[in-house]
């Protein structure tokens, strides 16, 4: 599914969780294990609300929506300890590493614009230093006042390119609807690679929606095509 207003771009910004790295399965298990400690399970409705939010916001949603008998402070502490232990196991999603290497080898400026906190991002990239060193820079959620769906993280990430591109020259890759909203609010085009639980009407908001990064054709956005 594609929006008819696709235009050439010069710079590319990547979300991290659920787009580059398969962290969503890790987070889902962490939330289930922490909430079960307090006698509840994450419902499908709550799970949908967690996608694309910051860790702290997701913890707030769990405590409030599930009416957990625990303070937000204690829940965040439990969640942080368990997630920091498990997140280093996250691998690249299909097509992610290949696309990053392709853009880098063709001298396309690329960066990561993650809503996750600094400590979380550092843990996730531990096993993948070689690939993440290919990015011009990495911006994390601790560096901005407002998380997605506000555009702050994308504005900051774009501003760190030298020279700074116009938003209309930037392409964002996202998996969540809040991320898509943030990219569009920033005046950028956005390719969405959503999970199966994202409804069709939310996918339609993106410039282009794909089932996998393996399906992405760079030439659609004026970027160098894959050669094999």
Image (cartoon, rainbow, N blue to C red):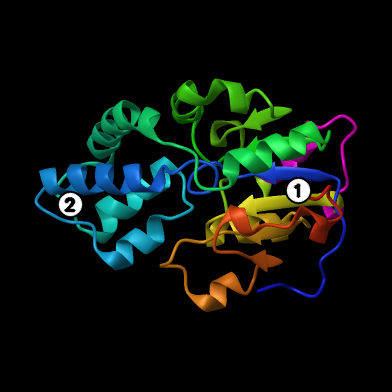
Reply yes or no: does residue 156 show up in magenta. Answer: yes
Q: Residue 204: x and y, percent? A: 62, 74
Image quadrant assignment for residue 181: bottom right
Image position of 163 with respect to 24: above or below? above
Which residue bears the numbered disc 1? 226
Which residues fall within the magenta stretch?
153-168
Front residue (pair 74, 209): 209
Number of other residues with Cα within 10 Å of mark 2, as a class: few under 14, some 14 to 19, many 20 or more: some
Q: Which callout, 2 or 1, points to the residue nearer the camera?
A: 1
- Determine if residue 157 is in view: no
Instruction: Identify the residue at image location x=69%, y=26%.
Output: 134
**Residue most extreme to the front:** 228
Which residue bears the numbered disc 2? 68
Q: Is residue 33 left or right of residue 50?
A: left
- Determine if residue 90 is in view: yes
Instruction: Identify the residue at image location x=46%, y=29%.
Output: 124
**Residue most extreme to the left:** 39
Describe the element under mark 2 as helix, strand or loop.
loop
Front residue (pair 14, 223): 223
Real-space CA distance between mark 2 and mark 1, rounded to the nearest whole angstrom: 49 Å
Of callouts 2 and 1, the N-terminal one? 2
Image quadrant assignment for residue 5: bottom right
Instruction: Identify the residue at image location x=55%, y=41%.
Output: 16
Q: In this view, does 144 lie to the left or right of 57?
A: right
């Amino acid at each position: 599914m594609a929006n008819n207003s696709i235009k050439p771009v010069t710079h590319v910004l990547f979300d991290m969780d659920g787009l580059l790295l398969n962290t969503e399965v890790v987070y889902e298990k962490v939330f289930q294990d922490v909430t079960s400690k307090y006698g509840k399970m994450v419902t499908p409705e709550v799970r949908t609300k967690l996608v694309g939010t910051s860790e702290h916001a997701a913890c707030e949603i769990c405590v409030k929506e599930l009416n957990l008998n625990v303070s937000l402070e204690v829940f965040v502490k439990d969640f942080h300890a368990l997630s920091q232990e498990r997140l280093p196991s996250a691998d690249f999603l299909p097509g992610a590493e290949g696309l990053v290497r392709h853009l880098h080898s063709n001298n396309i400026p690329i960066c990561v614009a993650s809503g996750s906190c600094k400590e979380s991002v550092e843990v996730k990239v531990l096993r993948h230093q070689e690939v993440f060193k290919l990015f011009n820079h990495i911006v994390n959620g601790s560096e901005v006042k407002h998380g997605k769906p506000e555009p702050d993280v994308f504005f900051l990430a774009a501003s760190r390119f030298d020279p700074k591109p116009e938003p209309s020259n930037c392409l964002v890759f996202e998996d969540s609807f809040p991320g898509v909203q943030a990219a569009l609010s920033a005046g950028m085009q956005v390719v969405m690679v959503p999970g199966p639980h994202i409804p069709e009407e939310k996918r339609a908001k993106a410039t282009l929606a794909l089932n996998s990064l393996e399906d992405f054709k760079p030439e659609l956005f004026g970027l160098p095509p894959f050669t094999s």
